[in-house]
Amino acid sequence: MSLVVPGSTASLTEWLAYLELLHHQPIELGLDRIRVVAQKLALTHPFVKITVGGTNGKGSTCAMLEAILLAAGYRVGMYTSPHLIDFNERIRVNGENAGDAQITEQLARIEAARGEVSLSYFEYTTLAALMLFEQSGLDVVVLEVGLGGRLDAVNLVDADCSIVTSVDIDHTEWLGDTREKIGWEKAHIYRSGRPAICADPVPPESLVAYAKEIGADLWLFGHDFNYSGDRQQWGYGGRGRRRSGLAYPALRGANQLLNASAALAALEALRDRLVVPQQAVRLGLSQASLPGRLQILPGKPTVVLDVAHNPHAAAALAQNLDAMSFYPYTHAVVGMLRDKDVKGVVAKLARRVNRWYCASTEGPRGLEGTQLADIVREVLPPPGKDPVTVSSFINPVQAFTEARKQAAGGDRILVFGSFATVGPVLKELGRKVH
């Protein structure tokens, strides 16, 4: 059955539905297809380009770079994925989500240019972002790598500076099952002779070796850049630049100084092309926002939203929960994708949760709430004097609604496990993303 190409008046929703059906595999890594179409579109990328890869911390690092560069007066584009509520969150121009018409215009141009070349949903949208950025006359763009690095569509771009935030186990079916294999894949966003930032305190040897092999200018955390801080303020130290007396980033969490120092290392490495005064750093760090990353909503009970979906992120979430006030009960609304290390994630939080509300997630990679509940029961420690309860629900909103009914004013509700869990709950709460 041949698909009908959306017409000139088609909505963004119609275009995205078309893209989802167009390619036979939702994820198909490789740069050959996208390179062919990019050449047909004559993309030139006439701006400073920063790519950000890594297992965790990518979104936060991108958000801080965007906010600092905007505060410094630059025209900035940012491309991230996935989205929480609206697709438009993925493509931002000068601090604003791209409009539907801006995106559909680019999708129509790609459709006309691609000919017989089959592109995945992510390849289409990556090209659309790059085209819109080119059209918008930007000074600098920040591009989040979708999956891995070597074969991800974003790696089409020869970045002026690349950051790997962290390397841990995730997406094993595509990237390998060890940090060394995954680190090698992620290191491929680095470029010969250009700054290559690594914020992982214990970088895989494969990443260091690859950077040396291609002659990248490798900046290692703890060696080429670092941070220090006390309760009031923190400071960054790089190869030739120090920034002291900084307020803590608006983004909460134990790892945010690591992410912030990676962003500042990238800006130091690009100092010949981007002038960023101290005031822009201060302002940017205070204004950076990223929904769904240790997002604490006002009101009672306390609601904490976090898209943590692998053991590394769940361990950071657990640390952040421990740093919060005392709560008599913690209610966890959790939904995950079936290709994640569900047991590993649940194990990191098992001793911190009193009531589990397991939700089904949508899509081909979705995991049924009943299956998730079985895994949670398997991982939980033996019951104590106050037994932990586990229940299942057909979707995250239903699970969250029940958690709110059960939680007392002094309790805490944690919503985590996936963008597919946090997004629907945020939408239900009517919280506007950005």
Image: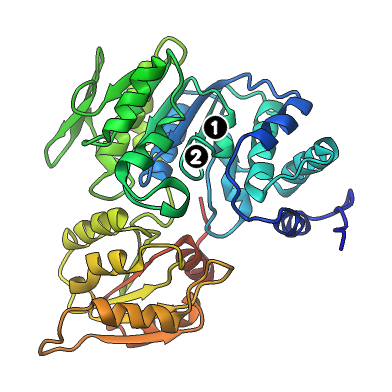
Tell me where residue 426 appears, x and y as whole percent.
Answer: 48, 66
Callout 1 crowding tier (Cα within 10 Å): few <14, some 14–19, many ≥20: many
Tell me where residue 308 appears, x and y as whole percent.
Answer: 36, 58
- Residue at 73% x, 30% y is 36
Foreground: 375 or 413?
375
Q: With respect to residue 374, does 351 lie above or below?
A: above
Q: With respect to residue 303, does 89 lie above or below?
A: above
Left or right: residue 184 versus residue 337 is left
The amino acid type of the residue labelled 2 equals: Val
Callout 2 crowding tier (Cα within 10 Å): few <14, some 14–19, many ≥20: many
Residue found at the far top of this picture: 272
Q: Which residue is mark 1?
A: 155
- Residue at 36% x, 47% y is 56
> Residue 386: which quarter of the image?
bottom left
Residue 429 visible: yes
- Residue at 30% x, 83% y is 407
Numbered circle sitting on residue 419: none
SS of the residue under disc 1: helix
The amino acid type of the residue labelled 1 equals: Asn
Q: With respect to residue 122, does 338 lie above or below?
A: below
State the CA–CA distance, disc 2 to disc 1: 7 Å
Foreground: 362 or 423?
362
Q: Which residue is mark 2?
A: 145
